[in-house]
Image (cartoon, helix red, strand yellow):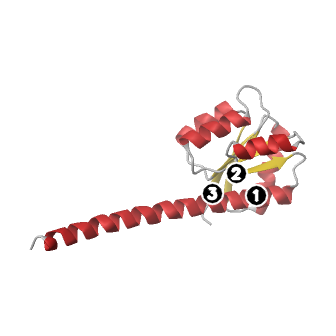
Amino acid sequence: MNTAPVLLVDDDEMLLQALSEAIRLRMSTVNVETVASAQEALQLLQTRDYSAVISDIQMPGMDGFALLAHVQEHYPDIPVLLITGYNDHKTAIQALHAGAYDYIRKPIERDDFVAALYRALTTYQLRQQIKEQQHALEYYALSLGHHIEPQAHE
């Protein structure tokens, strides 16, 4: 896997540091950028490409569900993992129905978190490969059509 930029969004500075460090130690091919709000995340998403977004659900201002909706609308290939302190199944189901790639409960088990992120990054990479192959096939079909068309008129 090539270097993968990941955006980590949480208003808890200690959690940002702990998760960033866990990713850096266990996933050497991942570059983590952190922000403390969904609004900051939206600004970065406009200027940079990310392979995954990890966001807390409960934050002041825009929450993780609103950020998820924005990412789904404007960057549908980017998987979003949602983190929450809520310990009920209703929130997990709501997150997955809203389009979250995965749902992670606090306190975060680092091995599970890294595994979920790895799956999300692999999914993103596969989506990009499929797009590239589709473009190559479209180009090939177009060029083939240009070669066949003149011969059909002869």
Looking at the rendered structure, the kind of residue marked 1 is Ala
In the image, is residue 136 above or below residue 96?
below
How many numbered marks does the figure carry? 3
Q: What crowding class fits label 2: few (fewer than 14 Cα within 10 Å), some (14-19), or many (20 or more)?
A: many
Q: Say which element carries label 3.
A: strand
- Residue position for label 2: 101
Asked if residue 84 lies left or right of residue 33, the reply is right
> Of marks 2 and 1, which one's residue comes earlier in the chain?
2
In the rendered image, residue 2, in percent from the top left (x then y), is placed at 60, 64
Q: What crowding class fits label 1: few (fewer than 14 Cα within 10 Å), some (14-19), or many (20 or more)?
A: some
Front residue of 39/21: it is 39
In the rendered image, residue 61, in percent from the top left (x then y), is placed at 72, 25
| Label 2 – label 1 distance at C-alpha | 9 Å
Tell us which disc is closer to us: 3 or 2: 2
Asked if residue 13 lies left or right of residue 1, the reply is right
Looking at the rendered structure, the kind of residue marked 2 is Tyr
Asked if residue 69 lies left or right of residue 114, the reply is left
> Of marks 3 and 1, which one's residue comes earlier in the chain?
3
| Label 3 – label 1 distance at C-alpha | 14 Å
- Residue position for label 3: 4
Q: Quadrant of residue 34?
A: top right
Would residue 36 be visible to someone looking at this image?
A: no
Q: Quadrant of residue 110?
A: bottom right
In the rendered image, residue 46, in percent from the top left (x then y), is placed at 54, 38
In the image, is residue 61 above or below residue 4?
above
Quadrant containing the N terminus in the rendered view: bottom right
- Residue position for label 1: 116
Q: Say which element carries label 2.
A: loop
For the residues bearing labels 2 and 1, Cβ distance under 8 angstroms: yes
In the rendered image, residue 119, in percent from the top left (x then y), is placed at 71, 61
Looking at the rendered structure, the kind of residue marked 3 is Ala
